[in-house]
Amino acid sequence: MADSEALPSLAGDPVAVEALLRAVFGVVVDEAIQKGTSVSQKCHYSIQKGAAFLGLGTDSVRVVKADERGKMVPEDLERQIGMAEAEGAVPFLVSATSGTTVLGAFDPLEAIADVCQRHGLWLHVDAAWGGSVLLSQTHRHLLDGIQRADSVAWNPHKLLAAGLQCSALLLQDTSNLLKRCHGSQASYLFQQDKFYDVALDTGDKVVQCGRRVDCLKLWLMWKAQGDQGLERRVGQAFVLARYLVEEMKKREGFELVMEPEFVNVCFWFVPPSLRGKQESPDYHERLSKVAPMLKERMVKEGSMMIGYQPHGTRGNFFRVVVANSALTCADMDFLLNELERLGQDL
Amino acid sequence: MADSEALPSLAGDPVAVEALLRAVFGVVVDEAIQKGTSVSQKCHYSIQKGAAFLGLGTDSVRVVKADERGKMVPEDLERQIGMAEAEGAVPFLVSATSGTTVLGAFDPLEAIADVCQRHGLWLHVDAAWGGSVLLSQTHRHLLDGIQRADSVAWNPHKLLAAGLQCSALLLQDTSNLLKRCHGSQASYLFQQDKFYDVALDTGDKVVQCGRRVDCLKLWLMWKAQGDQGLERRVGQAFVLARYLVEEMKKREGFELVMEPEFVNVCFWFVPPSLRGKQESPDYHERLSKVAPMLKERMVKEGSMMIGYQPHGTRGNFFRVVVANSALTCADMDFLLNELERLGQDL
């Protein structure tokens, strides 16, 4: 367990700082869709990668069930914590997601925070994708409870369209945790005898050394656009995604994976030869080959780039992520027309 | 130990891959200046930081003596390896430096490679700063032996002036080591059913996910400037550094820390009131306060930004790193005149 009350005693002790790093980023409880006997994780793969990279091993990551819409099930989280403890593990970090990569799902943060509070666990929210929604008065409810997180990851380079890369790690902690974790006090870089307050030198608190001042992009953009300008970007993305969904419903051959709550529009394009063949035994296999084929065609044509992927037990489906607020309804119409055109002979 | 022959058997085994990560980046033998009873490391602080970050702890980093010019002493490396083994440790990685941050020292790579070969150790060369010297036919001898390294880190954003950030990790390995270390096979991002060779998708082999295509800058710059254009950049930096050094020797009040072999020009500015007072008991203490004071003045004046630092037992001295090949001899003259002007009353 690593909560902010436990931290001050660790200051300046390398072994304790290492223990803290392990504590904060170590045993990770996360989310997954479990269906039948196979466990298919839906959290971002960076969680697994981080556990491997930090030397903890991917086995220390436990996956928590998600519901049909891809949201973490708090009851299963509670159950996983109990199981982990029964096995002698010491769970201490829960990584929830606000805006999953594929479905754009928002985990129920209030309920998850309750579980974390009960068990004294660090709550991290991966809001890399969905964090920008906080700027929208209309949609920010999707992140209710995020104010209870101990740490939040957020990428303004995604939905806000700041230039790649622009990533923020927000901490509840006010005790200079990052400095105490990563600070190396290299005297040849971070001189202490400067004429200004050296607490303003933040270089020693990050993992990297030489790097771009990525936060400047966010600051400039925010100054230029204002809260309202950024809110408009977020709002416009929701409007366009909704338009796309409604237009799909009017056309034959577009089947939504689910009604989206965010700007990830996941759907199958069912080509003419497969329409009405849902009962055919090879339907799903044939359908899963459609997206790769259309992707090849659109890339070679140079007209669009739309991602696709399998997900859990679902075969390949397209994922249109409407993140560029400069797009218009006409672009959405083009997208649908182009898919129909490219897939008319399939 | 982790050499490329030992690697193939690790493929696809998460525990073994974790072991490999530990092996490659784990127990690090590095370099330092040891004087009297204090050990003052001169390798880049990223080595310590990496060991902490990977959960190995800074205690697993052993420091190797460096000579007066800041170059690793191969005999002491051999001795440290013996000591580590006697203590039951398993050394397997030596991190040498080509172009240290402060003095710009190049380690004797051939001799170090011999030690590594004898003991079966992975040789990493931190050539972040000095690696670009390889592009100069005149000066590349400074890196003789680097072709024997297992891995090399290189920052074209330093001496070649590619835009921040542009960093390369070069590996001797041809067995897709990084993919096997970091690959997570996230099926929703790295689809296998594409119409082209998916081996071209390199995204899964790095630690990060969303990131800029930094290598494009290097590629474009190289195409635009050619080998010769880049060689000129490197050569011009050496010429300017040499000019600066020779001009310093003609003036009163500039004392070189040592004759540079690279483009790091390290020196004290001895102000009028301290000249000829070398024997005074508080000389070194007073001298070490000069650089911070002058730095404050130049920053407030807005005329220059020159770094300074203490180093080992040496008090604060300036470090002019001549890395911008667009500078001229007139800029070097300005620098010296400006230091004299700003320090004339000290």
Image (cartoon, coloured by chain):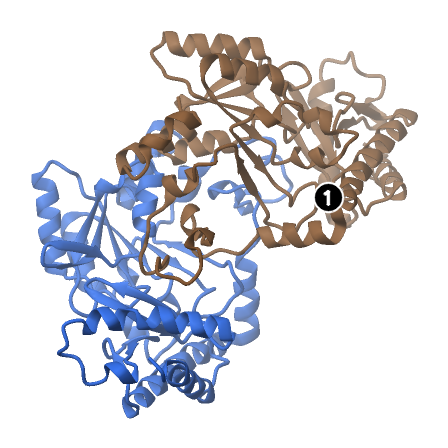
Chain colours: A blue, B brown
| Percent of width and height locating residue A231 | 43, 77
| Percent of width and height locating residue A256 | 25, 79
| Left/right of residue A104 with respect to residue A222 in the rendered view | left
The correct choice, above or below, for A121 with respect to B21 in the image is below
Residue B343, quarter of the rendered image: top right
Residue A113 in sight here: yes
In the image as oriented, which residue stretches furthest toward the bottom? A250
Q: Which residue is mark 1?
A: B305
| Left/right of residue B31 with respect to residue B220 in the rendered view | left
Closest to the observer, B297 or B43: B43
Closest to the observer, A91 or B172: B172
Residue A297, quarter of the rendered image: bottom left
Closest to the observer, B344 or A290: A290
The C terminus of chain B, quarter of image: top right
The correct choice, above or below, for B204 with respect to A6 in the image is below
Closest to the observer, B217 or B286: B217
Q: Secondary structure at mark 1?
A: loop
Residue B292 in sight here: no
The correct choice, above or below, for B239 with respect to A47 in the image is above
| Percent of width and height locating residue B29 | 48, 20
**Total marks in image:** 1
On what subunit does the disc labeled 1 rest? B
| Percent of width and height locating residue A326 | 50, 80
Q: In the image, what residue occupies the spot 55% across and 69% down?
A: A221
The N terminus of chain B, quarter of image: top left
Q: In the image, what residue occupies the spot 19% across and 85% down?
A: A276
Query: Of the residues shown, which amino acid type is indicated by label 1?
Result: Met
| Left/right of residue A121 with respect to residue A165 in the rendered view | left
Q: In the image, what residue occupies the spot 56% across and 8% down?
A: B75
Q: Dot 1, how many residues are within 10 Å of its Cα: few (below 14), some (14-19), or many (20+)?
A: few
Q: In the image, what residue occupies the spot 11% across and 36% down?
A: A88
